[in-house]
Image: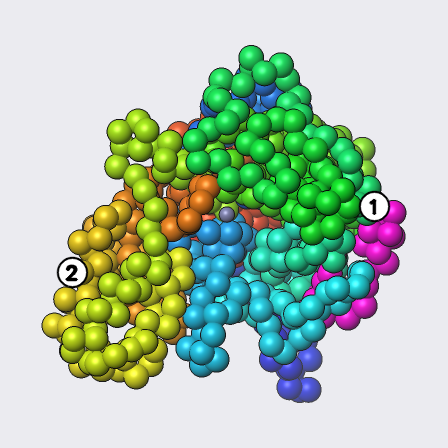
Amino acid sequence: MPRHRPTPPLALPLIAPVLVLLLGIALRTTALTSALDPPKLVVVIVVDQMRADYVARFQDTWRGGLKRLLTSGAWVRRAAYPYLETVTCAGHATIATGAFPHTHGVFQNIWWDRELHKQMTCTQDPRVSNVPYAAGVTGGDSAYRLQVPTLADALRSERRARVAAVAVKDRSAIMLAGHGGDAVTWLGDSIDTWQTSPAYSTEPVPAVKSFLDANRISADFGKVWDRLLPPSLYPTVDDGTGEAPPAGWTTTFPHALKGTTGKADDSYFGQWLRSPFADAFIGRFAAALVESLKLGRHEGTDLLGVSFSSPDLVGHGFGPRSQEVQDMYLNLDRTLAALFDRLDSLVGRDQWVAALSADHGVTVIPEQLRAEGKDAGRLSPPVMTAAIEKQIEAALGRGPHVAAIVGDEVYFHEPTAEKLRGSPDLVKSIIKAMAAMPGIDRVFAANDVRGAEQSKDPALRAAALSYVPGRSGDLIFVPKPGWITAARGATHGSATPDDQQVPSLLLGRGIKPGRYDQPATPADIAPTLAALAGIALPRAEGRPLAYVMQK
Ligand SMILES: [Zn+2]
């Protein structure tokens, strides 16, 4: 969202630039900035679904990039999202903007669009058609639903940044970049369907095209994913209860990337996405763009956004206690080592700064928790819908009244929503019925949540920080710890520590190495990086972490 400065009247050709300069100085002096010259390149790395406890659990086996982040960087050990809807789009938007969903507007991956009467993704943009790098690309996406500028947007307008962002997931690449950028690339629903949006480029970007022409996903066909280390170094079992591998794989190593038919088809693609080969591809892609776009090698501060989506897909299928998850991070440690080495040689060892965090954590597979006697289970949106319909039917007649349950949000069809606004007792009875269901901790009406960001009730506060007027549901429920809304495997999306706590690691120019135990959120990352680059992010709600910055 570039802000347009008013055109100065002709009689005052010199005053306007002076005013702009003074305003710039005022902004800079009120913001905390680093005493060092700004970095040439800012690298924002998101590892999709990385739980905070993975660092402590797996660090002894790391030797590469994750190890370098821990030993040469700043490890902020108590970072956690304060909001309810802990999902990919919300997390990336929070890391990228430094604001929370109630401000940046992207509170879920998908929500019910009340005007169009259908579910929309956080990036779906009906005004545009995506720009393909190969056949099979459909749809149109952009960050137009993101209501504030990203760090990348601010660097583009104030530090002449070139911006590249790459991920398997559309929402990850798009949110890391924001409202513009030079090479913003993601993968569609089938093999090799890399694409961008006219929001970034109306033509394929030559640097991206030449990498993708030389690097095909089908090139990994026939490879085998096996453990990097001897099995004895994986303390958990390989065939954990409730694991849900993709088609063609079992719960145990090794996993051959041969699809179900022996061809590089959709089932192979599903396996590739759930393997370390996808992360390695993304790492190579990112390094190639730094080289070909000459990021970090001109006047200003550039930004590279990289999101590793495959740890999320592996975590959903095999769960956070699986050997597969541990091995993904061993591989990511190597992928990051290679990326950091390339940054050292292309940009200069002391010229770049990186931050690594996650968009959310994940809850353990409920069947594994139940086997330990814990309260855990699966919430079923169809069962919840039936219970709500029954409550309403007695008062308002036959439905359907419920339009959708998405994430932790219940949407009513508008005629029902209107009648419920005049029937507070009926709303109370629906809330009571929902709250009596197993696995549900709290249920709020949208009215209770609106404006409750300062509430002392942590569940209500979390719901309020995820609340976006017009986009959020009519009712919002808060699952109990151990309870998830997925029919198989593991998932996230609650206000529990499992889903909210993530690592926050910073490395490079201007960063003071160490371990820090002050409470923090991932919304502090963008303001910290902005401060190192000498700019401010006026819409951010996080703050620069002064203690990780060199004086
Ligand atoms: Zn996920």
Instruction: Give the residues drawn in magenta, as a range.
Output: 194-215
Q: Is residue 281 magenta?
A: no
Task: Indicate the colouring scheme.
Answer: rainbow
Location of residue 308 (image quadrant): top right
Foreground of the two, 521 or 165? 165
Q: Is residue 208 magenta?
A: yes
Q: Which residue is mark 2?
A: 432
Up/down of 238 relative to 365, above or below? above
How crowded is the residue under tag 2: few (<14 C-alpha within 10 Å), some, or many (20+)?
Answer: some
Q: Position of residue 287 (x, y in %)?
A: 77, 41
Q: Position of residue 66 (x, y in %)?
A: 60, 28
Pointer 1 or 2: first along the chain: 1
- Residue at image position (76%, 53%) is 192
Residue 135 appearing in the image = yes
Location of residue 268 (image quadrant): top right
Residue 167 appearing in the image = no
How far apart marks 1 and 2 lie (CA) works out to: 55 Å
Q: Would you say 357 lies left or right of 462 here?
A: right
Q: Would you say 65 lies left or right of 406 here?
A: right
Callout 1, which amino acid?
A: Asn
Q: Which residue is mark 1?
A: 215
